Image (cartoon, rainbow, N blue to C red):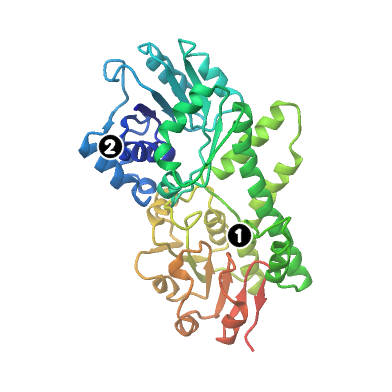
Amino acid sequence: MRIVVHGSELAAATAAAALSSVGHQVDWWPHPDAPWSQLSRAEWLTGEPGVVEQIDAGHRSGALRLFENGAGAAELSGEYDIAWLALAPDQRDAAEHFIELVAGQQSSPLVLVNNSTFPVGHTESLESLLRHASQVAVVLPDMLEEGRAWQAFTRPTRWLLGCEDDWAEDQVRELLRAFNRRAELFQRIPRRAAELTKLAINGMLATRISYMNEVAGLSDSLGVDVEYVRQGMGADTRIGYEYLYPGCGFGGPNFSRDLMRLADVQLATGRESQLLEQVLDINENKKETLFRKLWSHFHGQLENRTVAIWGAAFKPGTTRIDHAPVLTLLRALWAQGVHVRLHDPAALPAVRKEVGNHPLLTLCEGAPYEACEGADALILVTEWKCYWNPDWRRLGDMLQERLILDGRNIYDPAYVAARGLTYRGIGRRADPA
């Protein structure tokens, strides 16, 4: 098939790479605000396993053409089978301009695949810009996860397809046939339902996380280890274990954005979104929980102390810190005059770009233990695998107050306490004997 992809999101890069890798002829037109010359150096993309390598391979083979600074009618290849939109939610004008450009020179049948998170019902509006009855718009919600985008696209668990046209469904099935071989993965529903489902999924996941964080706070107050509660809840088949892990808050460029968009959708229909507002409030408050635990441990005497932080990225496997809990934590610590020594295996450039050369911040690019030199306490914010099994004897010798604040509950409280350190997690705690 002949495909044109438009957008500079991770979904656009992954689609261009994956589709060109299985024999399709792909033209990729990044958004003019983020051309390939910029994307090729973006750490959030270069750090995504497999994607840039596949883009380079497709470009070398000729299966993938890259438009550097946006394309005009003269550069586009004329007739396409598929136009794939993967733009940011605030780039609807760019989507409309792109469709008018493609449709203006397209006389043959065309399927517009909307892989962007636009308002519910917007795919129908985009279809109205097409020129012929044989040109149809469908919804294929972006379900990629940062850190494993290539795997999620090429070995998906399902494809949620918003479509009311049998011929368009057949075209999309052929487009993705190479990634639909092991089992039938397509779930076809109406377009508006697919657009709302994408937002509703993230709303449900965020609600589970925030609810579990509320339970963790209650466990702290009652002296109950929340891990027992989590396991008891997860064993109930009506609930399950997924997204029941309490922590110091979620972040990311898409998760929070989708929640706000879902709240906006509800508000636009005249329905006040009290639940989502509570979910977002709980999450923002949870980003301060590690600071509050540090404050409590030292009875508010934090000025001129030094703390080590392990992890800045909003999740393991990415370089991004968008809405990450570490940003809230840093601001709270600096307001109290606390010196911070921060380590992250991938996100330090993003931190440097966000906060600059702050006088109370030292970025540690070597081993994780470098951050602990001269520190009173260690705060775990992002559960990178390199942090899971530290040398506890070494940490005990390095941390002057021998305090561990575990924002992701990855450590065993009793084991840590048995090594002579004080442990404080999210709904979990243990003191040395």
Helix, strand or loop at mark 1:
loop
Q: Is residue 21 above or below residue 332?
A: above
Distance CA(mark 1)–CA(mark 2): 36 Å
Q: Is residue 31 above or below residue 152?
A: above
Query: Closer to the camera, 300 or 269?
Result: 269
CA neighbours of label 2 inside 10 A, class few (<14), some (14 to 19), many (20+): few
Q: Is residue 321 visible?
A: yes
CA neighbours of label 1 inside 10 A, class few (<14), some (14 to 19), many (20+): many
Q: Is residue 369 left or right of residue 41?
A: right
Query: Closer to the camera, 40 or 123?
Result: 123
Residue closest to the far right = 222
Disc marking residue 54: none
Which residue is at 64% across, 49% downward?
206
- According to the picture, the residue beneath numbered tag 1 turns out to be 248
Q: Is residue 140 above or below residue 411?
A: above
x and y percentages locating residue 324 in the rendered image? 53, 52
Q: Is residue 86 visible?
A: no
Which residue is at 69% across, 48% downward?
279
x and y percentages locating residue 124 in the rendered image? 57, 20
Which residue is at 31% across, 18% downward?
72
x and y percentages locating residue 355 in the rendered image? 45, 51
State the quadrant of the C terminus: bottom right
Please count the marks in the image. 2
x and y percentages locating residue 322 in the rendered image? 50, 47
Choose top left, top right, bottom left or bottom right for residue 123.
Answer: top right
Q: Earlier in the sequence, mark 1 or mark 2?
A: 2
Q: Is residue 337 left or right of residue 4?
A: right
State the quadrant of the N terminus: top left
Helix, strand or loop at mark 2:
helix
Residue closest to the far bottom = 433
Look at label 1 and name its amino acid: Cys
- According to the picture, the residue beneath numbered tag 2 turns out to be 37
